[in-house]
Image: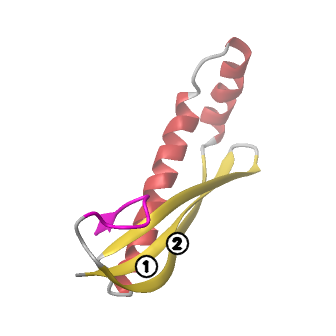
Amino acid sequence: MLLLNIDYVPGREITAALGMVKGTVVQSKHLGKDFMAGMKTLVGGEIVGYTEMLTEARQIAMKRMVDEAEALGADAVVNIRFGSSSLMQGAAEVVAYGTAVKLR
């Protein structure tokens, strides 16, 4: 599956737009990591546990988006975007979305 965050595929023709596809996940860290992240805010620096959590969440959201595109028979997903929001302390929602297309 070709994944692009531009609205065209260089050197290829989009023959059909199959619709918007998306993948979403709500991810959290366990209490111990959340406590350690809270301690890190006192001294500053990267909170590695949250970076890892968001990286994993983006990967899951992307996979779910690709699964939806494959179910439609897409060759590619173009104009991919990500969104995120904090639902509660220590938990974040990540959504990946784009347009599933057929190519020639």
Question: Percent x, y for residue 90?
Answer: 69, 43
Q: What amino acid is found at the position of numbered circle 1 in the picture?
A: Glu
For the N terminus, the quadrant is bottom left
- Check disc 2: other Cα within 10 Å, few if <14, some if 14-19, many if 20+: many
Residue 38 numbered mark, or none:
none
Residue farthest toward the top in the current orientation of the protein: 43
**Residue 47 falls inside the magenta stretch:** no
- Asked if labels 1 and 2 touch by Cβ distance under 8 angstroms, the answer is yes
Front residue of 34/44: it is 44
Residue 22 numbered mark, or none:
2
**Residue 7 falls inside the magenta stretch:** yes
Residue that label 1 marks: 68
- Rendering quarter of residue 9: bottom left
For the C terminus, the quadrant is bottom left
Query: How many marks overall?
Result: 2
- Rendering quarter of residue 16: bottom left
- Check disc 1: other Cα within 10 Å, few if <14, some if 14-19, many if 20+: some
* Residue 87 higher or lower than 19, as above or below: above
Question: Percent x, y for residue 34?
Answer: 66, 35
Question: Percent x, y for residue 83?
Answer: 61, 56
Residue 40 located left or right of residue 67:
right
Q: What's the residue at 77%, 50% (across, down)? A: 88
Q: Secondary structure at mark 1?
A: helix
Q: What's the residue at 24%, 72% (across, down)? A: 12
Q: What's the residue at 43%, 84% (across, down)? A: 17
Stretch of the chain drawn in magenta: 1-10
Q: What amino acid is found at the position of numbered circle 2 in the picture?
A: Lys
Question: Percent x, y for residue 41?
Answer: 71, 21
